[in-house]
Every structure is written in structure tokens, then in C-alpha cells.
Image: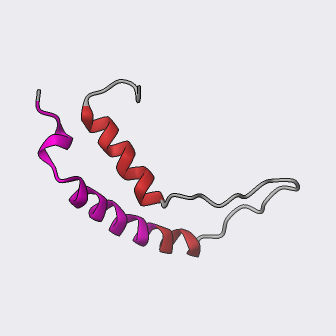
């Protein structure tokens, strides 16, 4: 069984996603955001958005139904 991820280079997928995320984050900073509520926790992520999106794309393209 050939999946979309096996036919594509994961490095190329990451580079394309990273380019998109950089452009999107620049536009996102220009749009006024809703103010934070009192007591809201804002922890910083250890992974970049492009890394998370690449994992999700690879998972959906893999044909598996769970991460296990």
C-alpha cells in the first residue's frame, strides 16, 4: 500500500509548511487579537507550529487511524 507520505519527501513537506507558517504568523500579528482573560495561562510551546503541522500532515497521509 502506497501512501501519500511515502511518495513525498518529509523534508520538502516541512519546508513548504514552514514557509507557509512564517507568512501566516506575520499576517496574524497584524490582526488585533482578543484580550486575555484574568487568570488565563499562556505557556510557550516547545515545538514550532510548522513542526506540529508537519506531524499532522504526515499522520493524515499515512493511512493509520491512531497514533498507537
Which of the 4 image quarters holds residue 65? top left
Which residue does the image show at 51% across and 58% down from the upper left?
47
Which of the 4 image quarters holds residue 29? bottom right
**Does 9 appear above or below 58?**
below
Colour convention: secondary structure
Which SS type dominates the magenta stretch? helix
Which of the pair 3/35 is nearer the observer? Answer: 3
**Does 26 appear above or below 9?**
below
Q: How many marks?
A: 0
Which residue does the image show at 28% across and 65% down from the upper left?
15
**Does 10 appear above or below 62?**
below
Location of residue 26 in the rendering, given as x and y in whole percent from the top left corner = 49, 74
Which of the 4 image quarters holds residue 43? bottom right
Q: Quadrant of the N terminus?
A: top left
Q: Quadrant of the C terminus?
A: top left
Position of 47 compared to 51: left or right? right
Which of the pair 5/21 is nearer the observer? Answer: 5
Location of residue 13 in the rendering, given as x and y in whole percent from the top left corner = 25, 56
Position of 36 compared to 45: left or right? right
Location of residue 44 in the rendering, given as x and y in whole percent from the top left corner = 65, 61
The boundaries of the magenta stretch are 2-24
Q: Is residue 62 magenta?
A: no
Which residue does the image show at 28% across and 63% down from the upper left?
16
Position of 45 compared to 7: left or right? right
Which of the pair 58/25 is nearer the observer? Answer: 58
Q: Residue furthest right?
A: 38
Amino acid at each position: 500500500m502506497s501512501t501519500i507520505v511515502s511518495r513525498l519527501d518529509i523534508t520538502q513537506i516541512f519546508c513548504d509548511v514552514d514557509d507557509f507558517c512564517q507568512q501566516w504568523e506575520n499576517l496574524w500579528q497584524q490582526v488585533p487579537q482578543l484580550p486575555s482573560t484574568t487568570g488565563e495561562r499562556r505557556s510557550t510551546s516547545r515545538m514550532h507550529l510548522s513542526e506540529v503541522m508537519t506531524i499532522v500532515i504526515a499522520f493524515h497521509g499515512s493511512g493509520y487511524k491512531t497514533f498507537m
